[in-house]
Amino acid sequence: MSTQILFSDLWLSDNLLNALEKKWFKAPTPIQEKIIPLFLNTNKDIIGQANTWTWKTAAFGLPILEKINTKNKAVQAIIMTPTRELAIQVADEIKSFTSSKAYKLALIYWGQSIWREFDMLERNPQIVVWTPWRIRDHIKRKSLKLDQIEYFVLDEADEMLKIGFRDEIEEIMQKTPDNKRTLLFSATLPKPIMNIVNNYMNKPEKVSIKSWNVNNELITSYYHAVKPMDKFEALTRVIETQEDFYWIIFCKTKRDVDEIAMVLERKWLKAEAVHGDIEQRMREKTLARFKNRITNILVATDVAARWIDVEWLSHVINYSLPENPEVYTHRIGRTGRAWKTWKAISLVTRSDYKFLKQIEYFTKKSIDKKPIPNGEEIIAIKKDRILSQIASKIEWNDTGKYFAITNNLLSKYNEVEVIDALLNIIYKNELNLENYKNISEENFKWGRSNNVRIFIAKWRIDSFWAKDIVNFITDKVNINPNDINDIELFDKFSYANVWLAEADLILRHFKKENPRKPVIVKAKEKWWSSRRWWSRWGYRGNNSRGGSRNSSRWRNSRWNSRGGSSRNSRWRR
């Protein structure tokens, strides 16, 4: 049994270990575990290939703090990031690792006052966090000297190239000393990045970390199946069932962000919106208020919140599921640093269901379905909360402010009537069951969009008929035979329709059984789209078993006449 590596095993100083302990950092993530000793104990350049949510900042930030000479007033380390949001996050994170005033850090990015930046640079910072545009500006103005740079970090290098910063990166690297150490971090290593590696790095050592996520152990994930018209009502019910929350709610569109934030504020919840149309300065203030717990609900788009990193987050709500599973993983990987459990809750409509199955396949973890809380359940939760709050006040002796009023009331009225009247004043109509309309759960087995067409490498010369296809699949995968529909038998292959969830199980099983050439794969979308209109009405083509397009046997039965069934096709139902 292997022992867990701790930060105390990574040759870090007591000052940094104390700072990590205050932040509840105990064990390093895989990227931190590999990069920190390599940085501290060698002089090699390093390539760190890891995804955005693996917490790389500590991997390079902690060793840089160890290596910096605080007596030297020159800039010794430059950390370059693609965006202002990430630059702010990196700077805040590095500052949080030390309380020593000996370390000076400057945060320079496009959008803030250049005079403020001149002031920061005149204070002789040892570490500078930049965005590429701004660094070129200061080099031209000679307000920044690069002759004593010892450490050069490129964070999210692939994102910088996507934005178009290749020329800026190369220009800046050419102006830095040849004997500096370069650390490049990127989720992918395409050819343009490898050109930078070959031209500007000295025999770097590559550290590659597969997608790792602490959420597998610490997160509770589930979803509610909802109709689009009921999404906001479901969201408010989820909020009402939680007592202590510190949330990010993710939406696909800026319009959803604005509307949700506005309605939540009307419900006296501390919620704010952040998206790309909001001015940069306002976004920074909003994020600062959220990090300081002045507001406890942040409603955001993925682009605006991409590099938000908040400790002690309790919930991540997916008001809309992303189409990319990696974006989902990045959303729910916002926290975890405090090593506490938290919840990821998704509101899933029928059109989102296919994305849910893709996410489960990508993360190799099933996401459980839970019913939407009904009115009775929410009122019961609220009543328990009221009783708990009153009991807590009494137990902690937090009473006495209103004894005069209380005694006056009790001298005139019955104590039960007094308490009931006070609760009615405080909670008004909040415990009225009529406030909660009935929400029916969405049925994901309705509609053609939730079917998957599969290709089966079994054909008539193998004596396979429609019933045999069903038996062949259900013998290997535990699914209901009735979920396999619209079977077509051709001379060299077969096709069938299955529900989205069942298709996922089937494709996984046969891929595992024969990775190189699975017997069953997903049919090509182009083929299925071109035939969809007539397949719905039962036409199978002249090559199908059963003959011509006028074959009523194919139109009206799930299987053909040989061992078939007379029930109507589930596809048509």
Image: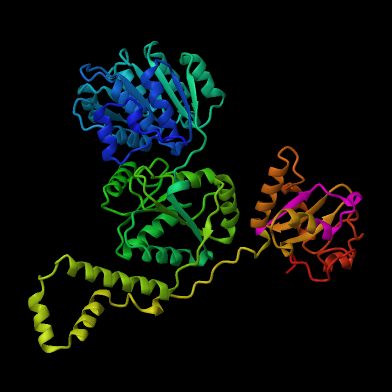
Name which quarter of the figure residue 64 lies in.
Answer: top left
Q: Residue at x 43, y 27 (%)?
A: 34
Residue 459 included in the magenta stretch of the image: yes
In the image, taking residue 506 as reference, residue 261 lies left or right, namely left
In this view, the residue in front, 409 or 7, is 7
Q: From this view, report whether residue 345 is shown above or below residue 136.
A: below
Residue 246 included in the magenta stretch of the image: no
Asked if residue 96 can be seen in this view, the reply is no
Q: From this view, report whether residue 402 is shown above or below residue 3.
A: below
Q: Residue at x 33, y 48 (%)?
A: 312
Q: Quadrant of the C terminus?
A: bottom right
Q: From this view, report whether residue 138 is shown above or below residue 411.
A: above
Q: Residue at x 40, y 65 (%)?
A: 236
Q: Position of residue 19 (x, y in %)?
A: 26, 35
Furthest-front residue in view? Answer: 1
Furthest-top residue in view? Answer: 178
Name which quarter of the figure residue 242 lies in.
Answer: bottom left
Asked if residue 108 can be seen in this view, the reply is yes
Q: Residue at x 27, y 28 (%)?
A: 106
Q: Which residues are magenta?
A: 450-470
